[in-house]
Image (cartoon, helix red, strand yellow):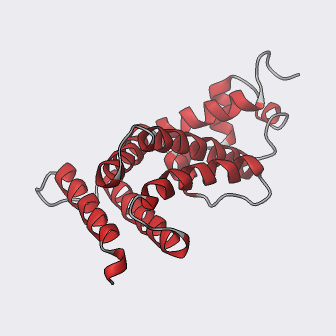
Amino acid sequence: MPRAGLTPATVVREAAALADEVGYEKLTLAALAARLGVALPSLYKHVRGVDALHQKLAVLATAEIADVLTAAAAAGRAGGDALRAVAAAYRAYARQHPGRYPAAQRAPDPADPDHLAAGERAVGAVRAILLGYGLDGDAATDAIRMFRAAVHGFVALEAAGGFGLPRDTDRSFDQMIAGLDRAYRSWEDR
């Protein structure tokens, strides 16, 4: 019999909190069962296995990122100001949720409509900013990939302690976003 009040949504929320505490790579069903105070087999009533748990965590994290990016994009900013706000929101999410953030890097599962919708919302927040630069269609796709690669690369290196030079990382991040802004403004000139 499942623990009273234990639902698939509760299991995923607790998995997300545990991942933030111990790291995504250390998220196991055994550790989650211990956190929830249930026997390991009891978890299978709520999630099919560790792969299914990681998929559900990917949906949750992607939806959360979509929420913060959408809120930042909708704050009445445009151009470089909007770009900086969305990039800062993305970085803040990665810092606040170091265990669930890696789950959001999983490409949306075509068989999971919730994951697809969350991914579309996250991409849509960046796409809306790029429209202000006159970027649409294939150019917007390239620019979205450029944004994600740059910001994700920065936050991943930062989280791993990969920046050893004595320059403030906030300044470096700001310079990177300013470089993206210049690239987007001159896109048609290339």
Q: Quadrant of residue 94?
A: top left
96 and 28: which is toward the camera: 96
- Say if 88 sits above or below 41 in the image: below
Image position of 138 with respect to 153: above or below? below
**Residue at the far right in the pictured view:** 1
- Towards the viewer: 76 or 19: 76
Where does the image place residue 80, in percent across and percent down from the top left? Answer: 29, 54
Find the residue positioned furthest to the top.
4
| Number of on-image labels | 0
Q: How far across and down, in percent of the image, does residue 34 sit?
A: 65, 29
Q: Left or right: 97 with respect to 103?
A: left
> Residue, x 44% and y 69% (percent of image)?
143
Residue at (23%, 59%) from the top-left corner?
163
Residue 101 in view, yes or no: yes
x, y percentage for residue 104?
56, 51
Residue 35 drawn above or below residue 60: above
Residue 162, position in %: x, y? 28, 60
- Specify the farthest residue to the bottom: 190
- Residue 25 seen in render: no
Residue at 79% from the left image edge and 19% from the top image edge: 3
Q: Residue furthest left?
A: 166
Query: In which quadrant of the rendered image does the C terminus lie?
Result: bottom left
Residue drawn where x is 31% and y is 65% of the image: 180
Q: Is residue 92 left or right of residue 30?
A: left
Q: Where, quadrant-wise, is the N terminus in this rendering? A: top right
